[in-house]
Amino acid sequence: MVKKRIFFIVFAALFATVLWLVTTGRSQGFDDSALAFFIAIRDTAPTMFFKAVTFCGDQATVIVLCIVIIALPGRMKVGLPIALMVTVGAAVQSILKDIIARPRPDMEYWLVGETDWLGFSLGSSFPSGHANTSMIFWVALAILAGRALILRGKKPAAILLLIVCFCFALLVGISRLYLGVHYLSDVLGGWTLAGLLLIVFFTLYDKFWPSKWRGLSI
């Protein structure tokens, strides 16, 4: 519990700092520099790669994955709690986007469409929904599956799974920078918000979720 409180304070402070930098305009300098850097390193192969990564981190894709794991036999152990985490996380970041209403980078920098059928931008820029949602989904999945692996004496496998899922979630956030649809502070905001929410989620999960439904049958 003490560790969770420490992590909660750390992530809350990090998110508050990023939020302050964005709302006061102090982040624009390094945001523009980061955007220029990723534009400068664009090439055919990495563009194809990051388009695929960003598709995997799209909220629609995550929703489909949630439906799939809810349909599996262990839905009460993994599927439902992850779906709840993703839903709450998406709601929180959507509310923040509406309140902060930060414009995305200019459309001339975009390598993927972020507009509706009328050509209007889909949502505000801060925090990044892709960064937030993918971090919540993949890290929560790794933690729940990893706990079961540890109980079965497979701690190295659990650690490897967490590293792989975490790195993939990081790649999703980086893809948003490379594709020019978000600023660096948007992605940092999405990641830190996800970390904050994951701590809250698992604190409540460990306290209130029925013990018979904790874990994963592998």
Image (cartoon, rainbow, N blue to C red):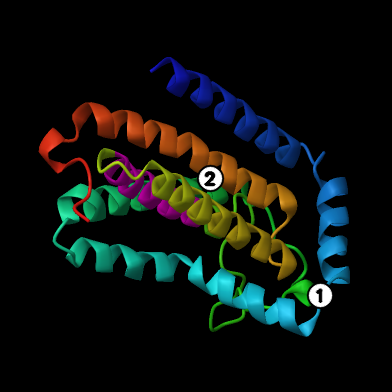
Residue sitting nearer the eye, 100 or 83: 83
Q: In this view of the protein, can residue 171 be seen by the observer?
A: yes
Q: Which residues are magenta?
A: 133-150
Q: Position of residue 90 (x, y in %)?
A: 43, 52
- On screen, residue 11 versus residue 181, left or right, reads left
Taking the image as shown, residue 24 lies to the left or right of residue 52, namely: right
Label disc, if present, on residue 42 of the rendered structure? 1
Q: Position of residue 22 (x, y in %)?
A: 72, 41
Q: Is residue 82 above or below residue 68?
A: above
Neighbour tally class for label 2: few under 14, some 14-19, many 20 plus, Cα within 10 Å: some
Quarter that holds the C terminus: bottom left
Q: Earlier in the sequence, mark 2 or mark 1?
A: 1
**Secondary structure character of the magenta stretch overall:** helix
Dot 2 amino acid type: Leu
In-front residue for pair 38/72: 72
Q: Quadrant of the N terminus?
A: top left
> Which residue sits at x=81%, y=75%?
42
Q: Residue furthest top?
A: 2
Say left or right for 205 vs 103: left
Position of 189 relative to 180 (above/below): above
Query: What residue is disc 2 on?
Result: 96
Element under label 1? loop
